[in-house]
Amino acid sequence: MILSMDTSTLGLSLVLADEKNILAELNLTGDKPCGEKIVESFDKMLKITGLASEQLDKIILTTGPGSFTGLRIGMTFAKGLCAVNRIELRGIDTHIPVAWRLRKVHKTVLITQDARKGQLYASGYESKGEEVNVLIPLQSWDPRDLISCLPSCPVSICGTGIRYLKPYLSAREDLIWLDHPWWYSSLAKTLLSLWESEYTDVLDPTTALPHYFRRSQAETGN
């Protein structure tokens, strides 16, 4: 049985599945990180399905970028489950399942997140059949530097960083602005499709950490 989970946003997305079917799915949204509800949410799913955590043998989760609190809580929870059971743990960058979800409709995409302090987490991808290839590496960007990396072809742009880019790109009529938050919601179900893909990393549960892509405010003291 596999547990798929995303705690990278203010929402929480969990899916329990076996080799053939989704057994339970739970998605929460809110103004504060919902990752704090992960324990009670997981317990609720086990009760609904009549399953036990000992039946888990796989966990896949988003490792960042995203909410520092959410990522930390999600990784701690996953590592705790792995500590008491023989579970294979895999992680994946938050932007990959978004690009995967968009691949059949939008050939070239730019995925953005507000990283605060005038910065954006962003990455660009080009879809080719059932593959998504990196055009712009996932990292923390200054919006002006990011714009200089955009390809000249039509690009679909999604995520919470859109509002920082629009003022600089008003002259580009070939851009498609995907403002709806759906692209980031309920990512756990999409993660199931990526378990065996080249985009995942096999993680050591004793040493695995989220990928924050920048230092937190607590670390910098600012």
Image (cartoon, rainbow, N blue to C red):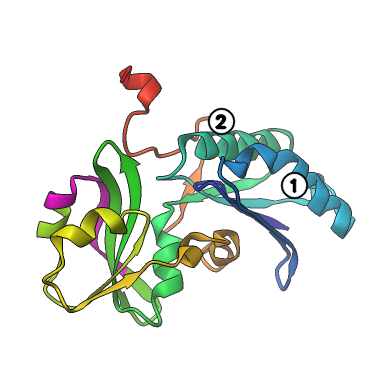
Locate residue 8 relative to residue 77 in the image: left or right: left
Residue ID at (40%, 78%): 130
Front residue of this view, candidates 69 and 169: 169
Is 193 drawn above or below residue 60 in the view shown?
A: below
Start and end of the magenta stretch? 133-144
Is 22 drawn above or below residue 58 in the view shown?
A: below
- Badge 2 amino acid: Thr
- CA–CA distance between discs 2 and 1? 24 Å
Check residue 170 for magenta coloring: no
- Where is residue 180, by image quadrant? bottom left
Residue 141 placement (x, y as % from top left): 21, 46
Front residue of this view, candidates 185 and 103: 185
**Local secondary structure at mark 1:** helix
Residue 63 placement (x, y as % from top left): 47, 45
- Residue for badge 2: 206
Do we see residue 197 in this rendering? no
